[in-house]
Amino acid sequence: MRELVAILIFGIATLASAYLFGLLGYFFTGIFLILEHIPEWVWSATLLSLTIVISRSLPSSSA
């Protein structure tokens, strides 16, 4: 009887994980489609601004 319960539990767990991975696939596909339409210069501007912000926030070592 325990073997039957284990088979049912593992079967349900397999179906649930497949469903969740399918939802994650739809989610990431939507994100990638949105990111695809952002112009390429936005990423360069973001990296440049982050570099400037980080370099200004670091303590200056004027010795």
Image (cartoon, grey):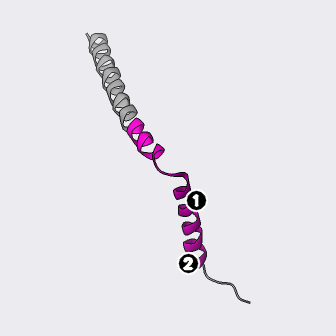
Disc 2 crowd rating (10 Å Cα; few below 14, some 14-19, many 20+) is: few
Name the spot of residue 41 as percent of width and height, x first. Answer: 55, 56
Question: Residue at 32% across / 17% down in the picture?
Answer: 11
Left or right of 8, for residue 49: right
Span of residues in magenta: 28-57
Q: In terms of image quadrants, where is residue 62?
A: bottom right
- Between disc 1 and disc 2, the foreground one is 1
- Residue 10 included in the magenta stretch of the image: no
SS for callout 2: helix
User: Which amino acid type corresponds to the residue marked 1 in the rendered image?
Assistant: Ser
Magenta-colored segment: predominant secondary structure: helix
Residue 50, relative to residue 4: is it above or below?
Answer: below
Q: Which residue is mark 2?
A: 57
Residue placed most toward the observer, 41 or 3: 41
Name the spot of residue 31 as percent of width and height, x first. Answer: 41, 42
Question: Residue at 42% across / 40% down in the picture?
Answer: 33
Q: Which residue is mark 1?
A: 44
Residue placed most toward the observer, 26 or 63: 26
User: Which amino acid type corresponds to the residue marked 2 in the rendered image?
Assistant: Ser
- Residue 41 included in the magenta stretch of the image: yes
Question: Residue at 36% across / 33% down in the picture?
Answer: 26
